[in-house]
Image: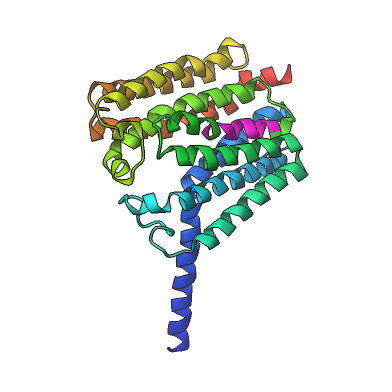
Amino acid sequence: MKPVARSAALERTTGRVLADYLVLVRPRISAFVLFAAYTGGLLGAGPEPDLARVALAALFIGLVGASSSVFNQVLERDSDRLMRRTATRPLPAERMSVRDAVVFGAVLGLLGVVGLAWSFQALSALLALSTLASYVLVYTPLKRHTSLNTVVGALPGAMPPLLGYVAVNGSAGPWAWMLFAILFAWQFPHFFAIAWLYRDEYRRAGMRMLPALPGAVGLAGRQALLYSLVLLPVSLIPAVRGEAGPVTVVAALVLGLAYLASSAAFAWRETRTSARAVLLTSLFYLPLLYAAVLFDPAVSLALRN
């Protein structure tokens, strides 16, 4: 092989390997974890936050979240092989060894947990470690045994803003729990829409997701509607407590009603169009609401008092 051709082949191989490692950390989810942790950290830091310190906390929490994604794919590699949307991932496609993935996940988790303990405090490190353990050792195996896995998985799934708050502040204040509650409720319509869209694949892979169960027609839509109804008052708690103002209220109402409307349409008739509408609305909801909180002058004023 000529040197130029050999170099090009090496670049393609290196690019493929790097792309596979990127797939393992699920970059879109990792980006959301970073943003949620950063939001929690900013609110935990008070009226004059050290932005670099908040970003460092979010980075360590993001590493723990990425580790969770890696170990999730390690444990579900056989199931992923049976689903079209996941069959091309590095582990089911056998482009990467299980050992390499485990080492990668362990390094990410270790860097995140140790980084939190070293740069912040033991509490944030212990909470991050328990979040990783519950996601990987409890939620992931439960997906093969009970549809309640969604409720269990929503607990570690809602932890990033709380972890960010605790890392920077040292304890969990009201905003930590309010952001946790919003994220917890938000997850259900989002995941029920995904589970409905891929219910046949989940069924084939032996995953006990609610829409994949026998006789579950209509359940995903009704559950999505129920949790979107719960989310609306939960998102208004900061304003009721006097810790947020009109910016947050308007954002919570507009986004919450949009989420509610899409979930109601999904409950009325479960179709690919209505499920995708819920999913699309969910992707806009959380970043916009968190951004509204961060730019709400009333929130800044409340943090100063």
In the rendered image, the quadrant that contains the N terminus is bottom left
Image: magenta residue range: 157-166
User: Can you say whether 46 is above or below 107 in the image?
Assistant: above
Q: Position of residue 174 (x, y in %)?
A: 65, 20
Report the side of 28 relative to 294 (left or right). Answer: left
Residue at (54%, 61%) from the top-left corner? 99
Q: Is residue 304 left or right of residue 130?
A: right
**Residue 241 x %, y %:** 61, 11
Say if the magenta span includes residue 24: no
Residue 201 locus on image (x, y percent)? 29, 44
Tell me which residue sits at (65%, 35%) in the image.
164
Residue 276 appears in the picture as rendered: no
- The residue drawn where x is 57% and y is 10% is 240
Would residue 146 be seen by someone viewing this image from the given angle? yes
Q: Residue at x 32, y 42 (%)?
A: 202
Reply yes or no: does residue 160 show up in magenta.
yes
Left or right: 63 in relation to 271 = right
Whole-percent x, y for residue 216 in the image: 27, 27
Q: Residue furthest front?
A: 145
Q: Main secondary structure of the magenta part?
A: helix
Instruction: Give the quadrant of residue 262.
Output: top left
The residue lying toward the viewer, choosing from 144 and 36, is 144
Relative to the observer, which residue lies in front, 33 or 75?
75
